[in-house]
Amino acid sequence: MRYLILSDIHANWEALQAVRAHVRRKRFDRVVFLGDAVGYGASPNRVLDWLRSQGDNLITVRGNHDRVCAGLDSAEHFNRYARQAAEWTLNCLEERNLEFLKSFLGGPVELEEGVAACHGSSVDEDAYIFSAYDAQLAFAATPQSLILFGHTHVPSLFMLREDNGKQTLKVRLLTGRRLVLDLDPENRYLINPGSVGQPRDRDPRAGYAILDSSQRRIYLYRVTYRTSVTRRRILNAGLPPVLGDRLLYGA
């Protein structure tokens, strides 16, 4: 099975369009979305319309912004910029997209035997996986050998190997325009494909991945898009300027 892996679009239509163009000639069977379709950006309905159009080929996992922007949870724990964006999003969502957003599944979700998807950690969808300690908790919470996650907006890999009862955990940031990783069946992996719509690794390009589960191989890509157009759309919507400015620098 080949999966197109998308995460953290954050209502950035231009970034999603660039990814769509990039995958046009690539083969995949299902689309897996790791959460946060909305929040921060100014095109929530366009993004949700496209996700809905994938029909039965789409597997969605709920993100924290999805939950808040759908009115399922309070925005009180968000910073003031995220809170303003969440309130704006809830007010402008079309009814069909609001109901669609509410239907997103809480993770982790098993895609097939040995492969799971979640937004934050498999322990808690709001928890970030930045450190080896965070990764250990996530590995302990679910049995799959490959766990796909988002939330941090940073393409990264955590690899757990056990030899003679001794565990070794390696951490790697995933950089570059195209990266191919072969997954050793003896190891366990946590892999973040990065963010489509709001990268935070000082690289403004949109990030996504394609997983070939039969070959145990994952391809990670970065795609240039018109950040200035997205920024202008955010400003024109009256959203906090910082939400557009940060896109220019991948911050």
Image (tube, rainbow, N blue to C red):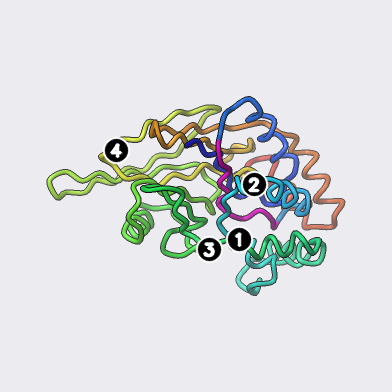
Report the span colored magenta: 29-39
- Mark toward the start of the polypeptide (4 vs 3): 3
Residue underneath mark 4: 185
Most distant residue in the top direction: 25
Check residue 33 for magenta coloring.
yes
Q: Is mark 4 on a helix, strand or loop?
A: loop
Residue at mark 4 to residue at mark 3: CA–CA distance: 27 Å
- Mark toward the start of the polypeptide (4 vs 1): 1
- Mark toward the start of the polypeptide (4 vs 2): 4
The answer to the question of whether label 3 and label 1 lie on touching residues, with beta carbons closer than 8 A, is: yes
Residue underneath mark 3: 106
Q: Disc 1 marks which amino acid? A: Phe
Residue underneath mark 1: 104
| Quarter-of-image position of residue 227 | top right
Residue at mark 4 to residue at mark 2: CA–CA distance: 32 Å
- Mark toward the start of the polypeptide (2 vs 1): 1
Q: Around disc 4, counting alpha carbons within 10 Å, would you say few (fewer than 14), some (14 to 19), or many (20 or more)?
A: few
* 196 versus 215 height, above or below: below
Q: Please identify the dominant SS of the magenta region.
A: loop
Q: What element carries label 1?
A: loop
Name the front one of labels 3 and 2.
3
